[in-house]
Image: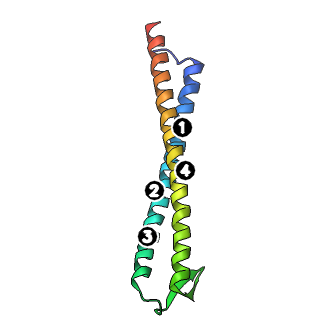
Amino acid sequence: MSELPPQIQNMIAQLQSVQQQLQIVVNQKIQLENSLKEVENAMQEVEKVSEDTPIFKSVGTVLVKSDKSTVLNELKEKKETLEVRIRALSRQEEKLKERLQELQNKIKSMLSGVQAG
């Protein structure tokens, strides 16, 4: 088979770029989902302790004493932030998957046209 036309080469390059972007988004989403699980586990543990139990939270490399309600509020805020970011990445992932499918279909139809010609 002869060399591919420049238009098809360009579309293949776009396809590879979209695949890389998709992989990055998927990896980011996985990291955020793992962070979300950690926050949810921490919330469950904090909710188990009594109000007068001392709770320590990590601030940089130092542990700082805090109270249950403050820690729970901070964890809830972090959880909400993570959920928003995960939803945004999910939408981005879907758009990239659609773009990937679209490019694959275009390349297939163009290749079949090249082979027929």
Q: Secondary structure at mark 1?
A: helix
Mark 4 crowd level (few <14, some 14–19, many ≥20, 10 Å Cα): few
Between marks 2 and 1, how big is the CA–CA gap? 18 Å
Which residue is tagged 1?
18
Q: Left or right: 40 with respect to 16? A: left
Who's the residue at 59% across and 26% down the image?
10
Who's the residue at 53% across and 61% down the image?
82
Between marks 2 and 4, how big is the CA–CA gap? 13 Å
Q: Left or right: 13 with respect to 47? A: right
Who's the residue at 47% across and 89% down the image?
51
Lower sequence index among marks 2 and 3: 2
Q: Secondary structure at mark 3?
A: helix
Residue 30: mark in rendering: 2
Mark toward the viewer: 2 or 1 = 2
Find residue 49 and report its image quarter: bottom left
Lower sequence index among marks 3 and 4: 3
